[in-house]
Image (cartoon, rainbow, N blue to C red):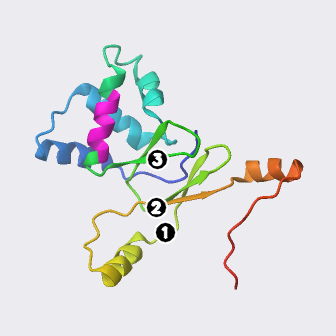
């Protein structure tokens, strides 16, 4: 559905596997393949896409296996679930870097905004609330450049967010 524009740490795969082993979560060949796929993905894939892509190499894998593995990765904090307006599909994002996901309200395109200092957000949240922050997941919604052009060409108006300077 979209393209990531960042690089993954080379040891992300080993970190995930080691964490799961410490939690006594069984490491199967299918689980390894799903982990490698989501870490190396240049998209925010759905379970169906992961299943279709891995099935040729893992013909005994079921769709339920992919769902179950993604749930484990979400529960352990390695993957975030992304919901798109007017779309029942859940998309997944490996959280190996600090970023904000930006979702187009028109077409569902998902992009990553990289210049985010989540540590500052976490510190500010702690100072204001006293909460110990364990995870920060931010999603912004807007209209992608392609849809903006289409809307302008059709003469349609859309609201934009701009901070007054």
What residue is pinned by disc 1?
116
Task: Give the numbered dot on residue 142.
Answer: none
Residue at image point 42% right, 62% down: 98
What residue is pinned by disc 3?
82
22 up-or-down from 125: above or below: above
Which quarter of the figure has residue 39? top left
Q: Quadrant of the C terminus?
A: bottom right
What residue is pinned by disc 2?
138
Label 3, secondary structure: give it: strand
Label 2, secondary structure: give it: loop
Assign the magenta stretch its main secondary structure: helix
Q: Nearer the viewer, residue 121 or 35?
A: 121
Where is residue 28 drawn, in percent x and y?
21, 28
Where is residue 136 drawn, in percent x and y?
37, 64
Horizontally, residue 73 falls left or right of residue 138, namely left
Where is residue 51 drawn, in percent x and y?
41, 25
Could you tell which of marks 2 and 1 lies nearer the N-terminus? 1
């Amino acid at each position: 559905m979209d393209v990531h524009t960042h690089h993954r740490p080379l040891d992300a795969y080993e970190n995930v596997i080691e964490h799961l082993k410490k939690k006594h979560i069984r490491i199967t060949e299918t689980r390894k393949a799903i982990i490698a796929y989501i870490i190396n993905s240049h998209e925010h894939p759905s379970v169906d896409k992961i299943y279709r892509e891995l099935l040729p190499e893992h013909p005994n894998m079921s769709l339920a296996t992919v769902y179950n593995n993604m749930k484990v990765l979400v529960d352990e904090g390695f993957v975030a679930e992304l919901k798109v307006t007017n779309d029942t599909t859940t998309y997944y994002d490996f959280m190996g870097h600090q970023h904000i996901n930006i979702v187009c309200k028109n077409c569902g395109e998902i992009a990553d905004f990289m210049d985010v200092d989540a540590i500052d957000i976490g510190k500010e949240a702690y100072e204001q609330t006293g909460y110990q922050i364990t995870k920060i997941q931010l999603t912004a919604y807007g209209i992608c450049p392609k849809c903006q052009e289409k809307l302008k060409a059709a003469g349609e108006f859309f609201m934009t967010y701009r901070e007054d300077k």
